[in-house]
Image: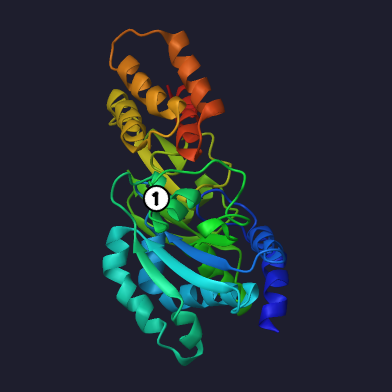
Amino acid sequence: MTKKNIIQKIDAAGLVGRGGAGYPTAQKWMAVKNALKYKQIASIVVNGAEGEPGVKKDGYLLAHKTEEIVNGVFLAYQFLGSAKTKKVYFFLKAEYYKAYSKKIKEVLKNKKYKLFASRVEFFSKPETPSYICGEETAIVNIIEGRRPAPRLKPPYPADSGMNYHPTLINNVETFYNVSLIDKGKYEGKRFYTLTGAVKHHGVFCLPADMSAEEVLRATNNYPGFDFFVMTGGEVCGELLRSDQLQAPVEGSGLLMVFDDKKTDHKKLLDYWFKFYETESCGACTACREGTYRLRELTSKSEYDKQMFNDLIHNLEESSLCSLGSSLPVTIKSYFENIN
């Protein structure tokens, strides 16, 4: 019954992926299942790369909710079919691999996971470049022993992933939520990381549809000073003023508060540009050259604003993956809302 009903339960719960993109989980699972009508082998990848600076939710879940995560992956394995799902990969950030891989292996010793556990392999994410190694097609390349760079999509991993076979890739938090859904315990919540100029740093589990202001107030973190926030991620996120906090926190669920008077805006911009320049995999010209040129331009007291805008536009329209295309979200929202 679990194998027959889990997809209906996930769909009814309205679960979306928690890796950042927010793609409907039921649709992704069905895409892999449908691809298996024509192909014989499938793989599952558990994405615990967490390359976005500041985000801590996956680490929290791996430390405290290991059994639920493993059970959620097992449910996916059952849904796709044990006869066809030949490999299950736990792809973890290096520090998470060191800290939690043994804990996961202990859970896998459970009798019900005997066959499933024999198909599990662990991969430690390369430390450089950090961000792009969490992108789903880059993960596939790394596991296959290829260069850590994203692939052109389509085809998507659901149809052509590991060794060109259907591959289901979901975030650690997504598999955790699947386990809750199966047990009837899912309450439409997600995990938020609170950081920056806040009183109470850490990971909080709250309703997924809460606004940024509601999250700050619910965690007793609403500032008593002039501030602005970054939502979604510490680098790949949207900048908002204190009067623009009605929208839900999306992306990786991070909410970072900046004390406006204590923030060196020039250093902040330089930090973002340096991150994107360093983390670019170099596969596409728009990102490889654009991030470098943006940092070069803004290092000067006076620079060509039209060239700046053209470079941002090129990144937005021409980048191969989400790294390059997310920089315009950060920069445009900063100049439109903050500066």
The reply to whether residue 146 is in sight is yes
Left or right: where 22 falls relative to 242: right
Q: Is residue 180 visible?
A: no
Q: Which residue is mark 1?
A: 146
Q: Give x and y (percent) for residue 24.
A: 65, 56
Residue at left offset 41%, top offset 75%:
66
The answer to which quarter of the image holds residue 339 is top left
Residue furthest bottom as drawn: 111
Classed neighbour count for the residue bearing mark 1: other residues with Cα under 10 Å, few (<14), some (14–19), many (≥20): few
- Looking at the rendered structure, the secondary structure element under dot 1 is loop
Percent across and percent down for residue 243 are 52, 34
Q: Residue at x 61, y 64 (%)?
A: 188
Decide which of 72, 252 is in the foreground and name it: 72
Tell me residue 85's x, y (percent).
Answer: 56, 73
Q: Is residue 262 left or right of residue 104?
A: left
Residue type, label 1: Arg
